[in-house]
Image: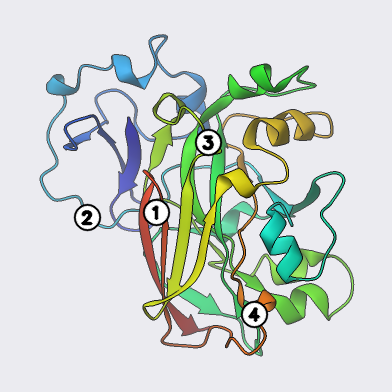
Amino acid sequence: MRLARHGTPGAETPLISGPDGVWRDLRPVVDDLTPAALAAAPASGWAGIDLDALPVVERPGRFGPPLAGIGKIVCVGLNYRQHAAETGAAVPDEPIVFMKASDTVVGPDDRVLIPRGSVKTDYEVELAVVIGREARYLPDTAAAAACVAGYAISNDVSEREFQLERGGQWDKGKNCETFNPLGPWLLTADEVPDPQALGLRLSVNGEPRQSGHTSDMVFGVFELVRYLSRFMVLRPGDVINTGTPAGVALGLPGTPYLRAGDVVDVEIDGLGRQRQTFEEA
């Protein structure tokens, strides 16, 4: 199933789409797609819903983030071997973890603001993992897999000067407003038999920049969930940005960083597409 939310910012309503690709109004089942809704999903899963009983939405409006009330966003750095190589960094022995505030999240096609004074705003296509069950001291990756509600596209927008040249931790370059477009939909976990078998692509103004594959991850999706559960409790509605493949501007000498007017297209197999136009803040 595909789960989504559409409408004006702050007033989105939930949608569901099954194998026929038709979007239907999910409000007869849940008021909105929230962490509580994920935790209270039907015993048979979302696939057990009688889609024919739901109203058809002929032309969905703007797609917002596929989940309201996101708890925390946990990000993983240097988690693709080729990306580590292009930045001159060693492949990490353990996941590099940092946090991103939930208020950075915007819809998949919403405008993204380049911070005032920025000269190195960068893009990062990432597979986002959405947690559906509490994950606490998980014993193995099988237990971790059972805690995943689904997957979405994330663009982990970053300001590299703020991140790497201004001292302190990475947070300053990761938490600028609008820096986490998410969606257009959440594809439920049962529809993704192997999250390490997905292609990721990103282009800037029609020029391909990133073309990677989740098989290049240093730490796979379920290992990340298991690992993170040793350091923090993952709860329904938490999101994990699992890292980006090679091709970011930081790793390509001479490649321009993003400026106002640039259009970024982002795609992951089965998870749809995003398109953002970048503007000055």
- Estimate the x, y position of residue 77 in percent, counting from the top left: 74, 56
Q: Residue at x 59, y 70 (%)?
A: 247
Residue bearing the label numbered 1: 10
Q: In this view, does 231 lie to the left or right of 33?
A: right
Residue bearing the label numbered 2: 61
Q: What residue type is labelled 4?
A: Leu
**Closer to the observer: label 3 or label 1?**
3
Please tell me whether mark 1 sits on a helix, a strand or a loop. loop
What whole-number distance in Å separates the C-alpha atoms at marks 1 and 2? 13 Å
Image: 168 above or below 94: below
- Estimate the x, y position of residue 11 in percent, counting from the top left: 34, 50
Circles 1 and 4 in contact, beta carbons < 8 Å: no
Image: 206 above or below 124: below
Q: Which amino acid does label 1 sit on?
A: Gly
Q: Earlier in the sequence, mark 1 or mark 4?
A: 1
What whole-number distance in Å separates the C-alpha atoms at marks 1 and 4? 37 Å
Q: Which residue is drawn at 51% across and 77% down?
A: 113
Residue bearing the label numbered 4: 252
Q: What residue type is labelled 3?
A: Pro
Q: Earlier in the sequence, mark 3 or mark 1?
A: 1
Foreground: 115 or 210?
210
Foreground: 184 or 92?
92
- Estimate the x, y position of residue 218 in percent, counting from the top left: 72, 46
